[in-house]
Each structure stands twice: as structure tokens, then as C-alpha cells.
Image (cartoon, rainbow, N blue to C red):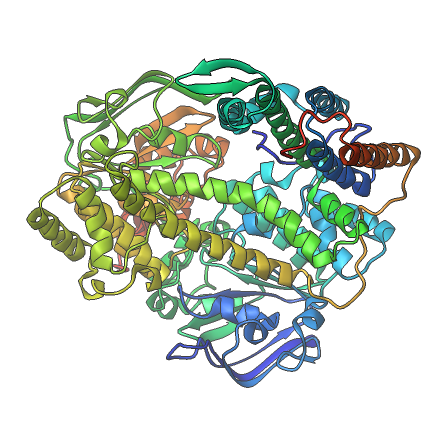
Amino acid sequence: MREVLIRAEHFQYQYPDTDRPAIDDVSFEIGKGEVVGIIGPNGAGKTTLCSALKGIVPHKTGGAWGGSLEVCGLNVRSATVADLAEHVSMTFQNPETQIIGTTVEEDLAFSAENMGMPPDQIRARVAEIMQKVRLPEEYKRRAPRNMSGGEKQRLAIAASMITSPEVIILDEPTTELDPVGKADVLHIVKELARTGENTVIVVEQDIEYLVTVADRLIVMQQGRILTQGKTREVMRQVPLLQKAGINLPDVALLWEAMGFSGKSDVFLTVDEAMEAMRADYCLRAAGPGEKTAPQPQTVCIEYQNVCFGYGEREILHHVSLQVPEGDFVAVLGKNGTGKTTMVKHLNGLLRPGTGDVVVCGENTKEHSVAELARKVVYVFQNPDHQLFNQTVEEEIAFGPKNLGWSEETVRQQVERALEQSGLTEYRQESPLSLERGLKQILILACVIAMDASIFVVDEPTTGLSQTYKKRIGDILKGLQASGKTIVLITHDMQFVAEYADHIVVVENGSVAAQGTVAAIFRQLDLLKGASLFPPQVTQLAVRMEPELASVPVKIGEFLSAVCKRGIGHDANRQLY
Amino acid sequence: MTQIGSYIDRDSRVHALHPFTKDLMFIAVFTLALLTNNPYFLAGLFAAIVAVGVAARLPIGQSMRTLKSVAALIVVFSVAVWPFSLQEGQVLFQVAGLKAYSVGLVYSLSMSLRFCCIVLMSIYWMMFTSVSEITHGLTCLGVPYKIAFSFSMSLSFVPLILKDLSTIQDAQRSRALELDKGTLLEKIRKNVSILIPLSSRALGLINQISVSLEARGFETKRKRTSISASRLKAADCAAIGLCVGLIVVLAVFRGLGVGLITRSVL
């Protein structure tokens, strides 16, 4: 191994006022120039571990500490945060709160100014670092607030690198970004990995890209290290990782399910899977019964030539769209393209400039948001924007009470929502103390109790591990089964493939395409234009059989369609 | 979309001034507006501020609209109250038994102008001075760095909180909350559903910001440098001279009572 830069020995840490350690007896070494991915479900202790490398834990948080942790020759426990800041940089999930300067240059200069670097040297370094993260020179005087999410995150990474730290920690740098931003940031990580000057530690939920750049992976669960090693060594342990609730790339799941484990090394990319399957496997058209969602007849959402803008800037251009009752439709597109503006018209938060939006036969222009809430409910992305009650029960009752229902009805609806969302055991808990995944389920429960017919759900799975994603997906599917219509905004293509029936692609304020999930996902060019990337199984299938009429979008579909050349349908081992 | 009160980068003479000069100009306008209540002078000051805005190539129309939305209520209030409450000069007319006085009327005009001067200068100051410059300018004026930084940081925190406020309102309205309906007590109770998430979000944001400040070496013991540091130029000296000169002259006038329309109120 290369020179060891970080060494943890039986390291333990417990936050004040908690009953179990956040980090529980972990030991590992990280060498100079390595790119290490730290993965694991929500609450596994990943962020705490990174904060410890920076000394924020325990110097700013207090709490109990055990074992030893050494970073760049400094003992974290005896070094100060300021000492460590010179060796270790860290960027966080939310780019908004990391921006300090009013211009890109100012923001980049901040750390260097704190370190007392002479202004001329800072200016030279700013130019150098901007090139490194591919921010064009004219951005120097721009206001970071007006830049896209990916650009902001790149700026945050650049700002943390300005003082040339040896260790760069990126804590979920792509979680809040759209696919374009994700690709942007990962490109930077790739660059850093290529030069090998820095040690890079990346925490991620979505590991599809991470596995292609990381030298090693450390998998955490409940504060402990579940497994660690070279990326491929770790990825081979598919069942273990699945059990831990990690979002695995489709190709790794295929590798396991199709019995490649004895024959070839684990697939990390579509290319690798393609290489291994090209010779021996082919796909046959998916059998009937694949997507037999009942064909609903009544239209419950209709956009009639809707235009909308703020001031002179038009955002939606002549949107016309129909969604039948009982459908599960995913609205896809990159950030800033008008998805949210479009769906905010459904419950009257926005009213069309010209044209009409009709939901369940009512024109939204003629009703208040509160009136429309009887038909359409809207679940915002971040639970922290709405939770405020003492208990889960009271939180769920808020909506029904606003609707003016009798006490008895409110009680019944709350019971139903608790049951449908699986939150009954938490009914007396404080909403704010729930963990993130449960909060997300709670805000869903809050609107289930309002018994509307249309559910608009904005990015419900951001930053959640597989276990919670599945719970949320199942709840939405359950709602659909009881006749509700679901409109979902998301960047999570695996989630769309698993749960949605139809897709609407929004591009530059217009509907660029709409159709069944399989029909849209197979149009790789269209998706690329909208900066979307279909699930790996679909990418693989389209490359294997470009002419295939109905392309698989889920692992299960792929497995039932794949067969050995000349032998027939064989490889159909069930995964779940 | 340009946010109100956020920095606008332009290649102008005003932008090129030293941060110290920019901060002093803001303080000077504030002081001058309070030192005199002469409407002619205040009108002149207002015109001078607009001229600064033009010289800085700022969006004048947009800033006037912002001024209108902020100042409208104060102006209406001032015009409705002062002529009747400041009982000096001639009685001009009577409304419902209340007498309107001439000095009071002029004073209401002065108060409106004062307020408009201060608001407009604040808008422009934040448009042509970046956060780092505000901080650096304040440290030049002798304010300790941490206090100067916290002040300028809190200014840039406002748009972030406003954005959150509108999201929270939308989120609760989507849960059928009707803020504008009901008795006063009910309205207050309804606002709890906005205020609790807002304050917990604000605390969360502050916490996140302080962690990222920490992460970027805010607390090092080393002597800080600043890329906004530069030497004072001729234009700075002229502007500083003008500001200081005007403040001195008006302070003397205030003491002597020259040019004041009344000495009974500020």
C-alpha cells in the first residue's frame, strides 16, 4: 500500500444524549492518492466518520470517543479544527449553504484568505483551480446564486481545494443534483483520481458512478464497517450489500442473478456487462403480461395549451397534456426545465397565464388552493418545510382538520393513513425526531389522510437508501391500486422503472415526449437530449437488441427476456 | 432572475471604488438624512443617490419598483400623520375636526424623502458592494473582522430564508391551510404552522453555514488577507472628502439651526 494518510484503530464515537455509538469500533487505513468510496444505508455513520476526519466531531459536537484516529500525522483528538483544516477539506450535500462569497472569485478566495495567503497568490490559485473544475474564466465575477446546482457544487469543491489540502472529502456531492449536475461533479472526481495528487473520500447513496472511479470501498451499517476492500472485491458481495439496503447498480445485480459469479468478474458498467453477454446471450421480446396496467378511460388531469411565466420570462410554452385516472406518471427532465412549475399548476399554487388546467373536471382558475386540496394533494420534497406538530398523529391530522371534517372523520382518516404508511408504531413520536426516511413517509401519510384523488409527489426518494425507497414505492403503488392518480417528479430512473407506468419528458418548458416507461426509455437519443439516462438494464438491452419491440426496464423483465443463444430461455433465475 | 438587494457586477467607476469608500458613502447618506430635515436638501440627496445608481449602471427602474413596494406604506403613513400631529405653522385645512398645519405638512414630505433616501441607498449599496467588500470596508472602518463578517453574511442570508418562507407557505397551503381566513386568534394559530418549520429551517441553515465556515478555516489563528484589499485612489479621496465635508457642514448647521424647518422634532 502507498503511504498511509489516514489510520483508524478501533475508533468509536457517540453523540451526546444518544443511546448508541454513531461509529462503533471501526478500523481502516487510507493511502495517499487513493479514491475511497464510503457507502451504506441512511444513518450508517458515514457523515459522522467524515466529520471526524475533519475534527468537527468531537471538537464541535462533544460526545464520547474511543480508539484512535490519525489524519496526515495528526491525532484528531488532540489536534484543533483549524490545524486539520489545512490538511483536510470537506464539501457537503447542500451547495446553497456552502457559498460564502457574492462572486465566484470571492467565494474561492475565502479559505485562502483565512489561511493568510497573499492576494496575488490567491488570484493565481483561483485561476488555476477554476480550470481544474472546468468553470470558465468569465464566471469569476458571476454571482454563484444564479448558477445551476452542478456548477454550485463544482464551485464548492473548488473552494475547498484552494488551499491544496491533502485529503478531499465529498459528502454526498451529487444527491441534490439532477443527472447533468451529477455527471459534472463525477467528472471532477474522475479528474482528481486521475492526477492522483489528492486523497479523495466520497460518500454516496447512488453508487452507479462511484464504483467506476473508486479504488476502494468502505461499506458501513449501523456505525460498523460491514465490509471493505478493493471496489471489485466489495461489489462481488452482492447479496450482502443488498441485505444492507444499498442501491446497487443494475449490472451488478444482473451479474449475480445470471450466475456470472463463477465465470467473470463483477460488472461495474454497461460496457462490461455487454462484453460478457455479447457472445452467448440474446433477448427475446418480453412476453405478454409485462405491463398490463388496466387501461383507464376517464381523463383526470388536462393541460389545455398552457403558457406561464414570471414577468416577461416565459417558462411553460403551450403545454397540452392529458393524464387518465388511476395512472402513475413520472415527470422527467433536468433541473430548471419547468417540471415543478408545470405540476404546481395542478393544485392551483400557480395559475396558467393563458390556457387552462382542468383536474377532476374542475378548472383550477376557479378554485383556491384549499378547495383544490380536496382533489389534488402536493407533497413537497423536503419534510423540514412542513413538519411542525408535537406528534406524528397530530401532524397527519393537520390537513384533514383544515378541510373542516368532523372529529370522527379526521380520526378515521388518521388511522387509515397511519396504517397505509406503516407508521402506526410511531404515532406518539415527535415528527422532527424521526429519521429522514420516516419523515419522508410521514409527509406522504399527511396527504393520504386528506383522501384526494390526485397525488403530486416531488422527489420523494432523494438521498434515501434502498429500504426506504422500496417502502415509498410500495405506498405509492398501493395508492394507485386504490384508484388514485400519481404524478411523480424524480431523477431516480430505477425508481421510475420499478413503479411508474407512463413518462412525460419535459424539456425547455414544453412536453418533449410522453409514453409508456418502456417506450420512452428505449429512445436513448431523445433521453440524451433531455440529459436523462435510462436504467442500466435498458441501456444494456437496447445495445444487445436494437430492434427489440418491447424493451425491459426492470431487472426481472430483463431476466425473463434474456436467453442463451441456441439454447432457449434459461437464465431466468429470480432475484428477489 | 436578479434577486432584490443582491450584488450586480458591472464595470463602473462606482464599483471600482475602495470598499471603505463604498461603506462610508452608505453611512454618510444615513447620517446626512438624519442631520437635516430640509426637504430641498433631502430632495437633492435623493437625486444624488439616483445619480450614483446611474453611474454604477444599476437597473434604475427595477430599484424604483422595489423602493415603491418598501416605502409606499411609510410615505402614506407619514403624510397622513405628521400634518396633524406636528402642530406648527399655519393651519391649512381641517379634516373631521383635525387641523392640518403647514410645518407638519412640509415635515411629512421630509420624512418621506428621508426614508426613501435611506432605502434607495441601501438597495444600491448592496448592488455595488459585494459581501467581501462590505466586510473589508467595515474592517477598514475599525469594526472587528468577525463582527463585520457576521453582518455581511447575515445580509446574504436573507434571500435564502425568503425562498424557504415561500416554499413553506406553499407546502402548508397544499395541506389546505388558509392563512387569510378566520378570526385574528385563528390566524395567529395558523401562522404557527409556518413559523415552526421556518425557524427550524433557519437554525438548520445557520448550522450548515457555520459547519461549512468551519470547514473552510474560518477559525484559524493566522492573520487574514483579503483580495478586496487595495489602495485608495483619487476618486476615493474625493468621495471620502465630499462625504466627510457634508457631514461636518450639516452637523454644524444642525447645531446652529440653519436650514431646519423645525427644531422640535428630528
On screen, residue A218 above or below B179 = below
Q: Nearer the viewer, residue A59 or A264?
A: A59
Q: How many marks?
A: 0
| Residue B4 on image: x %, y % | 58, 32
| Residue A307 on image: x %, y % | 39, 18
Q: Nearer the viewer, residue B244 or A138?
A: B244
Q: Residue at x 72, y 27 (%)?
A: B260
| Residue A95 on image: x %, y % | 56, 49
The answer to whether residue A106 is left or right of residue A327 is: right
Instruction: Determine the residue located farthest toward the top in the rendered image.
Output: B93
Instruction: Determine the residue located farthest toward the left in the rendered image.
Output: A408
Q: Nearer the viewer, residue A529 or A22?
A: A22
Residue A258 visible in the picture = no
The answer to whether residue A74 is left or right of residue B5 is: right
Residue B197 visible in the picture = yes
On screen, residue B137 above or below A172 = above
Indicate the quadrant containing the N terminus of chain A: top left, top right, bottom left or bottom right.
bottom right
| Residue B130 on image: x %, y % | 71, 40
The answer to whether residue B175 is left or right of residue A212 is: left
Which image quadrant for residue B1? top right
Q: Nearer the viewer, residue A279 or A100?
A: A100
Indicate the quadrant containing the C terminus of chain A: top left, top right, bottom left or bottom right.
bottom left
